[in-house]
Image: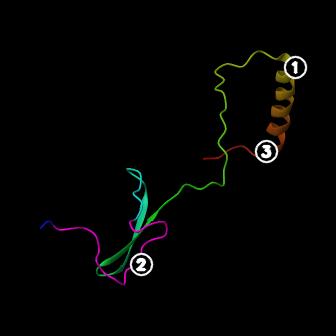
Amino acid sequence: MGSSHHDCNPHRRPPPGGDAPRELPAKSPVTIQQLDEDTFLVKRQRPSKDYVMIAVPVIKKLKSDPEWEAVESRMAAHHKRTIAPFEE
């Protein structure tokens, strides 16, 4: 008869949620840890959920704003006097 991939070990515990492991989606990132010569632990890596992604529009050209340009010129003049020049 044909061979089966099912482990017939009576002492084997089925994983939580059924007697066969769930299949991972294709190309899922995993870590593999070898526990002994014949035993490997495969753990799925999940992305961190510690961040939020936002969309920022691309601005190729700013509108002319003479009031802001005057403020920007004053800031540049001030920093030119107080910040040491860049040295390579």
The residue beneath circle 3 is: 83
Q: Are marks 2 and 1 in contact (CB under 8 Å)?
A: no
Farthest-out residue, left: 1
Q: Position of residue 49 (x, y in %)?
A: 63, 54
Residue at image point 82% right, 28% down:
72
For residue 4: magenta? yes
Amino acid type of the residue that numbered disc 2 sits on in the rendered structure: Arg
Residue at image point 66% right, 27% down:
57
Nearer the observer, 6 or 79: 6
Residue at image point 67% right, 46% down:
52
Amino acid type of the residue that numbered disc 3 sits on in the rendered structure: Ile
Sooner in the amino-acid sequence: mark 2 or mark 1? 2
Viewer-side label of 3, 1: 1
Magenta residues, as a range? Answer: 3-20
> Image check: 71 left or right of 44?
right
Per the image, label 3 sits on a secondary structure element best described as: loop
Q: Is residue 49 above or below residue 61?
A: below
Q: Is residue 69 above or below residue 82?
A: above
- CA separation in Å, label 2 and label 3: 68 Å
Nearer the observer, 51 or 28: 28
For residue 22: magenta? no
Magenta stretch, main secondary structure, is loop
> Image check: 69 left or right of 61?
right
Q: Is residue 13 above or below residue 20?
A: below
Q: How many marks?
A: 3
The residue beneath circle 2 is: 13
Return the mark for residue 33.
none
Q: Position of residue 82 (x, y in %)?
A: 83, 43
Q: Position of residue 21 (x, y in %)?
A: 40, 65
The residue beneath circle 1 is: 67
Per the image, label 2 sits on a secondary structure element best described as: loop
